[in-house]
Amino acid sequence: MEKKNVLASIRKNIEDHVGDTVTLKANSGRRKVLVNKGIIEKAYPSIFVIRLENDTQRKVTYSYSDVLTKTVQLVFAV
């Protein structure tokens, strides 16, 4: 499958979960992995925004390619 199609399916999946709670695992380099719970707030054409639960003011943004390269892993709450 083409990379463009994979990114489109990742974006569609994230767009379908806007407003849902997720567990976010982000590789921040040097063997550091940040694990947070948050809510997917918005999905834009090239990035998505997650508002972290433990801090109402803090928002993080990632690109869909971060999910593709497994720099960021999202686990959707059931």
Image: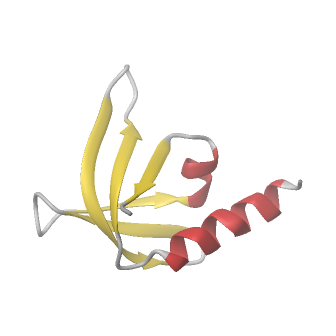
Residue at (59% x, 69% y) in the render: 13
- Residue 69 image-quadrant placement: top right
The quadrant in which the N terminus is found is bottom right
Colouring scheme applied when the structure was drawn? secondary structure
Residue at (32% x, 26% y) in the render: 32
Residue 38 position in % (x across, y down): 26, 62
Residue placed furthest toward the front: 78
Residue at (46% x, 74% y) in the render: 17
Where 10 sits versus 45, above or below? above
Where 69 sits versus 31, above or below? below
Residue 39 position in % (x across, y down): 30, 69
Residue 78 position in % (x across, y down): 38, 63
Q: Nearer the viewer, residue 58 or 77?
A: 77
Residue 77 position in % (x across, y down): 36, 61
- Residue 37 image-quadrant placement: bottom left
Q: Nearer the viewer, residue 3 or 14?
A: 14
Residue at (37% x, 20% y) in the render: 31
Q: Nearer the viewer, residue 62 or 70?
A: 70
